[in-house]
Amino acid sequence: MRHLLDIVDLSVEEIDALIETAEDIIKRPQHYADSCRGKKLATLFFEPSTRTRLSFEAAMYELGGNVIGFSSAASSSVAKGETVGDTIRVVSHFADIIAMRHPYAGAPLAAVQKTLVPIINAGDGEHCHPTQTLADLLTIHRQYGSFENLTVGVCGDLKYGRTVHSLIEAMIRYKGTRFVLISPEELRLPEYIKNTLTKSGMEWTETTSLEDAMPELDILYMTRVQGERFADKAEYERLKDSYTLTPDKLCSAKATLSVMHPLPRVNEISVKVDDDPRACYFKQVENGKYVRMALILKLLAEKEKPFDYITEGALLNVYKCRNRNCITTQCASPDQIFLPSGDGYRCAYCAHYGMG
Ligand code: NCD
């Protein structure tokens, strides 16, 4: 069966095909209006969401299908202590495809070990968020017509911001991408992603100054400081207003810049920027629905294809993950799986190196 856990599960050619389908849906929506007649999508959101859940639901309705699900762990049997594996096993008897969001990194990989239907990761802890990246890629493609030779500034919470992690993993595969990582010292990109950047041979720099980076950027991807992931709330209070994009800061930017943000924003972007033609964040929302429609169609069509989550060289229950937010740290956790990555073994659930 085919799932989408991480953006790198999709080849560059598959991403091109999804973008092409999404663009066709935009042109002739009526052609797709019955494509999922009789099918059900389950949206299992163990963590808050507005855009992603409603965008999945709107996508399924526009394909002629139906939706079941829950929008918080508190309103499901999780509140009674049910494991992710059991919840998924049960729901996969009721639905043809599942989109899930979970506060623990790697929960979707635990889910695929129990499911009977395709799983889509709609965000797992601080790890990744592949469907937001598909929305971002469609937005970039509609803006620039290609993904090559773009200088991308990612700004804000690069440590816990899962949308940035997936965007980097996606853009790394295109010729001439340059990344400028803009964050406070405390919220820098995790080492394991920096190592991926370095290994890819692409150019990247790190800075704390948004103003210094601005003139060279083609894309400025702002992010919210992820308060819910901080162990130390005082540290969150200190860092939460690190960057605010205002119209005056855009004076030194290119006229062709795209200002992006996965939303929700707190005060990373002043509302005064919303009317600037370079603001693209509401376009990302719109594009998210179309690309999720394309993804649902693809995964339902490929339901019979095999998916190996234990790949060659995997070590089962040899090491323990040290990431305190990994699903394997939970009771009744799934098997520990570590995969060789060229720079050591990494946890298959959350990509961290930790072992013990
Ligand atoms: C993001 C998320 O959930 O990671 N939101 C979204 O899905 N568009 C970003 C965020 O919450 O800051």
Image: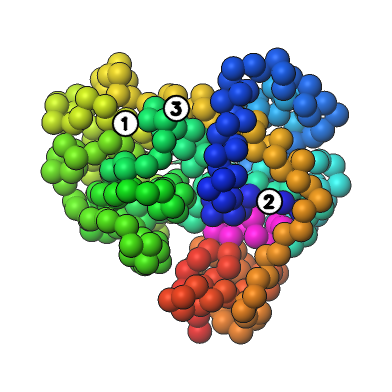
- For label 2, the residue is 3
Mark 3 Cβ inside 8 Å of ligand 1: no
Residue 250's place in the image compared with 303, above or below, is: above
Name the amino acid type tagged 3. Arg
Q: Is residue 240 in sight in this rendering?
A: no
Mark closer to the chain start, 1 or 3: 3
Within 10 Å of the Cα at label 3, are there few (<14), some (14-19), or many (20+) other Cα atoms?
Answer: some
Residue 112 is tagged as: none
Mark closer to the chain start, 1 or 2: 2
Residue located 46% across and 37% down the image: 137
Residue located 82% across and 33% down the image: 39
- Image position of 118 (left or right of 102): right
Give the quarter of the image for residue 265: top left
Name the amino acid type tagged 1. Val
- For label 1, the residue is 259
Q: Pick the residue in front: 317 or 324.
A: 317
